[in-house]
Amino acid sequence: MMPYKDLLLFLGDDQCCEQRTSAAIALAKRHNARVKGVALALNWPIPSYVGVEIPVDFSAARQEIAVKSADEAVATFTKVAESEDIEFDCEIITCDVSKAPAQLAFYARHADMSFLSQPDPDDDDFGYYESLLDGVLFASGRPVYAVPYIGRPEMKIRKAVIAWDGGKKAARAVNDAIPLLKDRDEVIVLIVNPEQRINAHGQNPGMNLVEHLQRHGINCSVEIETVANLSAAAVILNFISDSGADLLVMGAYGHSRLREWAFGGVTESIMHQMTVPVIMSE
Protein backbone atom coordinates (compact mmCIF):
# COMPACT_ATOMS: atom_id res chain seq x y z
CA MET A 1 0.00 0.00 0.00
CA MET A 2 1.20 3.48 -0.85
CA PRO A 3 1.49 6.09 1.94
CA TYR A 4 -1.36 8.51 2.50
CA LYS A 5 -0.86 11.56 0.30
CA ASP A 6 -4.09 13.52 0.59
CA LEU A 7 -5.96 14.02 3.87
CA LEU A 8 -9.22 15.86 4.50
CA LEU A 9 -9.74 17.78 7.73
CA PHE A 10 -13.07 19.20 8.82
CA LEU A 11 -12.51 22.69 10.26
CA GLY A 12 -15.04 23.99 12.74
CA ASP A 13 -15.43 26.08 15.87
CA ASP A 14 -16.13 23.05 18.07
CA GLN A 15 -13.97 22.12 21.05
CA CYS A 16 -12.63 19.02 19.26
CA CYS A 17 -11.16 20.80 16.22
CA GLU A 18 -7.72 21.30 17.76
CA GLN A 19 -7.37 17.58 18.53
CA ARG A 20 -8.34 16.37 15.05
CA THR A 21 -6.11 19.04 13.50
CA SER A 22 -3.20 17.74 15.53
CA ALA A 23 -3.93 14.17 14.46
CA ALA A 24 -4.18 15.07 10.77
CA ILE A 25 -0.97 17.09 10.82
CA ALA A 26 0.93 14.35 12.65
CA LEU A 27 -0.05 11.80 10.00
CA ALA A 28 0.68 14.24 7.19
CA LYS A 29 4.21 14.80 8.49
CA ARG A 30 4.88 11.06 8.69
CA HIS A 31 3.61 10.46 5.14
CA ASN A 32 4.57 13.75 3.49
CA ALA A 33 0.90 14.29 2.72
CA ARG A 34 -1.22 17.32 1.97
CA VAL A 35 -3.98 18.30 4.38
CA LYS A 36 -7.04 19.94 2.86
CA GLY A 37 -8.99 21.86 5.46
CA VAL A 38 -12.70 22.31 4.72
CA ALA A 39 -14.86 24.72 6.71
CA LEU A 40 -18.63 25.11 6.40
CA ALA A 41 -20.41 28.47 6.28
CA LEU A 42 -23.94 27.29 6.92
CA ASN A 43 -27.29 28.75 6.04
CA TRP A 44 -29.62 27.96 8.94
CA PRO A 45 -33.21 28.30 7.66
CA ILE A 46 -35.81 29.82 9.97
CA PRO A 47 -38.58 27.24 10.58
CA SER A 48 -41.89 28.23 9.01
CA TYR A 49 -43.77 27.32 12.20
CA VAL A 50 -42.20 30.29 14.00
CA GLY A 51 -45.19 32.22 12.66
CA VAL A 52 -43.56 35.61 12.28
CA GLU A 53 -41.85 37.31 9.37
CA ILE A 54 -38.09 37.37 9.83
CA PRO A 55 -36.37 40.59 8.69
CA VAL A 56 -33.99 40.20 5.77
CA ASP A 57 -31.19 41.87 7.69
CA PHE A 58 -31.55 39.26 10.46
CA SER A 59 -30.88 36.42 8.01
CA ALA A 60 -28.00 38.38 6.49
CA ALA A 61 -26.46 38.96 9.92
CA ARG A 62 -26.82 35.27 10.74
CA GLN A 63 -25.03 34.33 7.51
CA GLU A 64 -22.31 36.88 8.20
CA ILE A 65 -21.64 35.20 11.55
CA ALA A 66 -21.39 31.80 9.83
CA VAL A 67 -18.91 33.13 7.28
CA LYS A 68 -16.84 34.80 9.99
CA SER A 69 -16.72 31.55 11.97
CA ALA A 70 -15.54 29.64 8.89
CA ASP A 71 -12.92 32.29 8.15
CA GLU A 72 -11.61 32.07 11.70
CA ALA A 73 -11.42 28.26 11.53
CA VAL A 74 -9.42 28.49 8.30
CA ALA A 75 -7.12 31.16 9.75
CA THR A 76 -6.44 29.08 12.87
CA PHE A 77 -5.61 26.00 10.81
CA THR A 78 -3.46 27.98 8.39
CA LYS A 79 -1.35 29.34 11.22
CA VAL A 80 -0.77 25.86 12.66
CA ALA A 81 -0.10 24.25 9.26
CA GLU A 82 2.45 26.92 8.36
CA SER A 83 4.22 26.51 11.69
CA GLU A 84 4.40 22.73 11.12
CA ASP A 85 5.69 23.26 7.57
CA ILE A 86 3.24 20.89 5.88
CA GLU A 87 1.58 21.15 2.48
CA PHE A 88 -2.00 22.32 2.92
CA ASP A 89 -4.99 23.85 1.23
CA CYS A 90 -8.24 25.33 2.52
CA GLU A 91 -11.76 25.79 1.23
CA ILE A 92 -14.95 27.23 2.65
CA ILE A 93 -18.25 25.68 1.54
CA THR A 94 -21.39 27.78 1.76
CA CYS A 95 -24.54 25.64 1.88
CA ASP A 96 -27.75 24.96 3.77
CA VAL A 97 -27.24 23.00 6.97
CA SER A 98 -29.26 20.11 5.53
CA LYS A 99 -26.77 19.82 2.65
CA ALA A 100 -23.65 19.93 4.83
CA PRO A 101 -23.15 16.14 5.28
CA ALA A 102 -23.40 15.50 1.53
CA GLN A 103 -21.08 18.41 0.76
CA LEU A 104 -18.44 17.20 3.18
CA ALA A 105 -18.82 13.63 1.88
CA PHE A 106 -18.15 14.92 -1.64
CA TYR A 107 -14.80 16.36 -0.60
CA ALA A 108 -14.00 13.27 1.48
CA ARG A 109 -14.51 11.15 -1.62
CA HIS A 110 -11.41 12.76 -3.11
CA ALA A 111 -9.06 12.15 -0.17
CA ASP A 112 -7.26 9.14 1.25
CA MET A 113 -8.76 9.66 4.71
CA SER A 114 -10.99 12.19 6.48
CA PHE A 115 -10.48 13.53 9.99
CA LEU A 116 -13.59 14.23 12.04
CA SER A 117 -14.45 14.03 15.72
CA GLN A 118 -16.72 11.96 17.90
CA PRO A 119 -19.66 14.27 18.68
CA ASP A 120 -19.70 15.63 22.21
CA PRO A 121 -23.11 14.88 23.79
CA ASP A 122 -22.84 18.10 25.81
CA ASP A 123 -22.43 20.23 22.67
CA ASP A 124 -25.52 22.18 21.65
CA ASP A 125 -24.86 21.13 18.04
CA PHE A 126 -24.46 17.45 18.90
CA GLY A 127 -27.00 16.32 16.28
CA TYR A 128 -25.34 18.40 13.57
CA TYR A 129 -21.90 16.90 14.20
CA GLU A 130 -23.45 13.42 14.28
CA SER A 131 -24.94 14.04 10.86
CA LEU A 132 -21.55 15.10 9.46
CA LEU A 133 -19.81 11.99 10.74
CA ASP A 134 -22.70 9.82 9.56
CA GLY A 135 -22.71 11.43 6.12
CA VAL A 136 -18.98 11.16 5.49
CA LEU A 137 -18.70 7.62 6.82
CA PHE A 138 -21.59 6.17 4.86
CA ALA A 139 -21.59 8.29 1.71
CA SER A 140 -17.95 9.03 0.86
CA GLY A 141 -16.62 5.53 0.20
CA ARG A 142 -13.47 6.52 2.11
CA PRO A 143 -12.18 5.77 5.61
CA VAL A 144 -12.79 8.13 8.51
CA TYR A 145 -10.37 8.83 11.35
CA ALA A 146 -12.58 9.80 14.28
CA VAL A 147 -10.96 11.54 17.25
CA PRO A 148 -12.63 11.20 20.69
CA TYR A 149 -14.11 14.43 22.02
CA ILE A 150 -12.00 13.91 25.15
CA GLY A 151 -8.91 14.02 22.94
CA ARG A 152 -6.24 11.54 21.99
CA PRO A 153 -4.20 9.68 24.64
CA GLU A 154 -1.27 11.78 25.80
CA MET A 155 1.04 8.76 25.88
CA LYS A 156 1.63 7.47 22.36
CA ILE A 157 1.85 3.70 22.83
CA ARG A 158 1.88 3.05 19.07
CA LYS A 159 -0.33 -0.01 19.52
CA ALA A 160 -3.42 -0.64 17.38
CA VAL A 161 -6.31 -3.05 17.79
CA ILE A 162 -8.27 -4.41 14.82
CA ALA A 163 -11.82 -5.46 15.69
CA TRP A 164 -11.99 -8.42 13.31
CA ASP A 165 -15.20 -10.27 12.50
CA GLY A 166 -14.04 -11.75 9.22
CA GLY A 167 -16.53 -9.68 7.21
CA LYS A 168 -16.08 -7.44 4.18
CA LYS A 169 -16.52 -4.16 6.08
CA ALA A 170 -13.78 -5.07 8.54
CA ALA A 171 -11.60 -6.18 5.63
CA ARG A 172 -12.15 -2.83 3.94
CA ALA A 173 -11.23 -0.96 7.12
CA VAL A 174 -8.03 -2.96 7.55
CA ASN A 175 -7.00 -2.39 3.95
CA ASP A 176 -7.68 1.35 4.25
CA ALA A 177 -5.64 1.50 7.46
CA ILE A 178 -2.55 -0.42 6.26
CA PRO A 179 -0.36 2.66 5.69
CA LEU A 180 -1.12 3.83 9.25
CA LEU A 181 -0.76 0.34 10.74
CA LYS A 182 2.75 0.17 9.30
CA ASP A 183 3.61 3.09 11.56
CA ARG A 184 2.61 1.10 14.66
CA ASP A 185 4.95 -0.85 16.90
CA GLU A 186 2.30 -3.51 17.52
CA VAL A 187 -1.04 -4.50 15.98
CA ILE A 188 -3.46 -6.91 17.65
CA VAL A 189 -6.21 -8.67 15.72
CA LEU A 190 -9.00 -8.98 18.28
CA ILE A 191 -11.72 -11.58 17.68
CA VAL A 192 -14.75 -11.80 19.94
CA ASN A 193 -16.56 -15.14 20.14
CA PRO A 194 -15.22 -16.53 16.84
CA GLU A 195 -17.39 -19.66 17.12
CA GLN A 196 -20.40 -17.49 16.32
CA ARG A 197 -18.97 -16.69 12.87
CA ILE A 198 -16.93 -19.80 12.12
CA ASN A 199 -17.57 -19.58 8.37
CA ALA A 200 -16.09 -16.09 8.29
CA HIS A 201 -13.01 -16.98 10.33
CA GLY A 202 -11.94 -20.38 9.00
CA GLN A 203 -10.00 -23.03 10.87
CA ASN A 204 -7.54 -20.64 12.54
CA PRO A 205 -9.41 -17.39 13.32
CA GLY A 206 -7.38 -14.33 12.49
CA MET A 207 -4.27 -16.10 11.22
CA ASN A 208 -4.95 -15.44 7.54
CA LEU A 209 -5.20 -11.73 8.31
CA VAL A 210 -2.03 -11.82 10.41
CA GLU A 211 -0.11 -13.46 7.57
CA HIS A 212 -1.43 -10.88 5.13
CA LEU A 213 -0.44 -7.94 7.34
CA GLN A 214 2.97 -9.43 8.05
CA ARG A 215 3.60 -9.38 4.30
CA HIS A 216 3.22 -5.60 4.61
CA GLY A 217 5.82 -5.50 7.38
CA ILE A 218 3.28 -5.09 10.18
CA ASN A 219 4.04 -6.62 13.57
CA CYS A 220 0.78 -8.45 14.16
CA SER A 221 -0.74 -11.07 16.48
CA VAL A 222 -4.15 -12.55 17.34
CA GLU A 223 -6.11 -12.30 20.59
CA ILE A 224 -9.36 -14.22 21.02
CA GLU A 225 -11.94 -13.25 23.62
CA THR A 226 -14.75 -15.70 24.39
CA VAL A 227 -17.30 -13.93 26.55
CA ALA A 228 -20.93 -14.89 27.15
CA ASN A 229 -22.29 -12.06 29.29
CA LEU A 230 -20.89 -8.95 27.58
CA SER A 231 -21.64 -7.25 24.27
CA ALA A 232 -18.97 -7.28 21.57
CA ALA A 233 -18.61 -3.51 21.93
CA ALA A 234 -17.99 -3.81 25.68
CA VAL A 235 -15.36 -6.50 25.10
CA ILE A 236 -13.59 -4.35 22.52
CA LEU A 237 -13.60 -1.25 24.73
CA ASN A 238 -12.39 -3.24 27.75
CA PHE A 239 -9.61 -4.81 25.69
CA ILE A 240 -8.42 -1.44 24.45
CA SER A 241 -8.30 -0.13 28.00
CA ASP A 242 -6.50 -3.20 29.37
CA SER A 243 -3.99 -3.43 26.52
CA GLY A 244 -3.18 0.28 26.49
CA ALA A 245 -3.81 0.51 22.75
CA ASP A 246 -4.19 3.99 21.28
CA LEU A 247 -5.96 3.18 18.00
CA LEU A 248 -8.93 1.02 16.94
CA VAL A 249 -9.63 -0.14 13.39
CA MET A 250 -13.06 -1.55 12.54
CA GLY A 251 -15.77 -1.78 9.92
CA ALA A 252 -18.79 0.51 10.16
CA TYR A 253 -22.19 -1.13 10.20
CA GLY A 254 -25.39 0.79 9.69
CA HIS A 255 -26.96 3.19 7.26
CA SER A 256 -27.97 6.80 6.94
CA ARG A 257 -31.71 7.38 7.39
CA LEU A 258 -32.93 10.97 7.10
CA ARG A 259 -29.53 12.00 8.46
CA GLU A 260 -30.22 10.37 11.79
CA TRP A 261 -27.66 8.42 13.75
CA ALA A 262 -28.39 4.93 12.47
CA PHE A 263 -25.30 2.82 13.07
CA GLY A 264 -25.57 -0.85 13.89
CA GLY A 265 -25.24 -1.96 17.51
CA VAL A 266 -21.46 -2.43 17.86
CA THR A 267 -20.64 0.59 15.70
CA GLU A 268 -23.00 2.85 17.59
CA SER A 269 -21.70 1.73 20.98
CA ILE A 270 -18.09 2.26 19.97
CA MET A 271 -18.75 5.67 18.47
CA HIS A 272 -20.55 6.88 21.59
CA GLN A 273 -18.07 5.40 24.09
CA MET A 274 -14.72 5.54 22.29
CA THR A 275 -11.71 6.64 24.30
CA VAL A 276 -9.08 6.32 21.54
CA PRO A 277 -9.14 7.33 17.88
CA VAL A 278 -11.05 4.98 15.59
CA ILE A 279 -10.49 4.32 11.89
CA MET A 280 -13.72 3.14 10.32
CA SER A 281 -14.71 2.15 6.79
CA GLU A 282 -18.09 1.15 5.44
Image (spheres, rainbow, N blue to C red):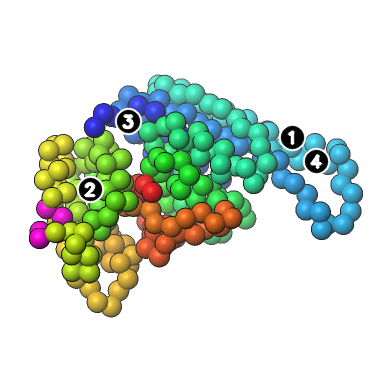
Name the amino acid, label 4: Ser
Q: In the image, residue 15 lies at what x, y percent?
A: 53, 47
> Is residue 142 shown left or right of residue 162?
right
User: How many numbered discs, if any?
Assistant: 4
Residue found at the very far bottom of the displayed protein: 229
Q: Nearer the viewer, mark 2 or mark 4?
A: 4
Q: Under tag 1, what secondary structure? A: helix
Query: Earlier along the polypeptide chain: callout 2 or callout 4?
Result: 4
Q: CA distance from mark 1 to mark 3?
A: 36 Å
Range of magenta residues = 203-207
Q: Is residue 255 above or below residue 228?
A: above
Q: Nearer the viewer, mark 1 or mark 3?
A: 3
Q: Under tag 3, what secondary structure? A: loop
Q: In the image, residue 191 lies at what x, y percent?
A: 21, 61
- In-front residue for pair 211/162: 211
Give the residue number, with chain letter if any, for mark 2: 159
Query: Earlier along the polypeptide chain: callout 3 or callout 2?
Result: 3
Q: Is residue 107 in the magenta section?
A: no
Query: Earlier along the polypeptide chain: callout 1 or callout 3?
Result: 3
- Labelled disc at residue 64: 1
Give the residue number, with chain letter if any, for mark 4: 59
Crowding around mark 2 (Cα neighbors within 10 Å: few <14, some 14 to 19, many 20+) is many
- Contact, CB < 8 Å: mark 2 with mark 4? no
Name the amino acid, label 1: Glu
Crowding around mark 1 (Cα neighbors within 10 Å: few <14, some 14 to 19, many 20+) is some
Can residue 268 be seen here? The reply is yes
Which residue is found at the position 53% from the left and 38% from the top? Answer: 104
Name the amino acid, label 2: Lys
Give the residue number, with chain letter if any, for mark 3: 4
